[in-house]
Amino acid sequence: MTAATLLTDSRDHLMGFCATLSPEEWNRRPNTGGWSAAEVLEHVAILEGLVSARLTKTLAEPSEADWRERTLDKDGTLHRAASRENKVQAPPVSHPKGQREPAQLLQEFNAAREVMIGLAKNSVRELEQRTREHPLFGVCNGRQWLELCAHHTERHLQQMREITGRA
C-alpha cells in the first residue's frame, strides 16, 4: 500500500469515527486515567502539524546518497507503530493542553494531513532520499515518516475507541 493510500485511509477512519462522538464521549477519561478522546485528538493534531512542517522543510535539503542503506531495515516493520500492545510516552511537545474544541482540532489535523497526502503523491521519491531520526524507529526516510504518521493515527484511533467503549 502506498504512503498516500495509508494516509488517506487513516484520515478517513479517524474523521468518520470522530463524526459519531457525543460531547460526553469526547470528554470521557479512561477509568485508569490518561487522556480523553479530545486530548488524544489534540496530540495527533499537534504531531501531524509538526511532522508535515518538518517534511516540507526537508525537501529543501540535499538528498543523501546512503539513504537506502540507512533505512532499508525499517520497511516491513513500521506497521508496529499502530499497535497498542506497548505503551509509548509521547514527547512533551505533543502533550495536549485542552484549550481547543474537537472541531478545531479536526480542522488542524485535516489541514496537516492534506499537506502530507500531497507530499506522498508528489514528492515521495524526493522524501525517500532524505532522512530524520525517529525517537522509536531510529533513522527513517521521508516516505517512512509519512507511513509512520498513518500508523500513529490508527494507533490513536484505537485508543479513542477504547476510551469511548467502542473498541
Image (cartoon, rainbow, N blue to C red):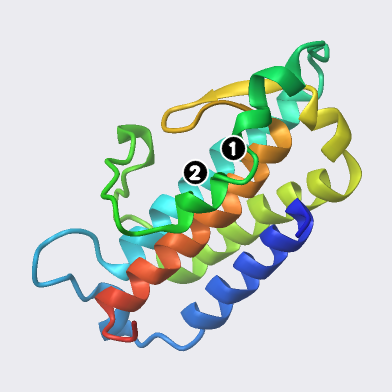
User: Measuring 79% from the left and 14% from the top, which residue is drawn there?
Assistant: 61
The crowd level at tag 1 (other Cα within 10 Å; few <14, some 14-19, many 20+) is some
As rendered, which of 35 and 132 lies closer to the eye? Answer: 132
The answer to the question of whether label 2 and label 1 lie on touching residues, with beta carbons closer than 8 A, is yes
Residue 91 % position (x, y): 33, 34
- Residue toward you, 98 or 82: 82
Rendered view: 85 above or below 165? above
Q: Amino acid at mark 1?
A: Val
Q: CA distance from mark 2 to mark 1?
A: 6 Å
Image quarter hosting the N terminus: bottom right
Numbered disc 2: secondary structure: helix
Residue 111 lies, in percent from the top left, at: 67, 55
Q: Which mark is residue 122?
A: none
In the figure, is residue 44 to the left or right of 57? left
Three-letter amino acid code of the residue under disc 2:
Leu
In this picture, is 67 found above or below 52?
above
* Left/right of residue 103 with respect to residue 62 in the rendered view: left
Q: Which residue is mark 1?
A: 51
On screen, residue 5 above or below 47: below
Give residue 49's position: percent from left, percent from top: 57, 43
Residue shown at 66% from the left, 39% from the top = 144
The residue that mark 2 highlights is: 47
What is the x, y in percent for residue 115? 74, 48
Q: For the point 87% across and 50% down, which residue is it? A: 121
Quarter of the rendering containing residue 5 = bottom right
> Which sits in the foreground, 57 or 131?
131
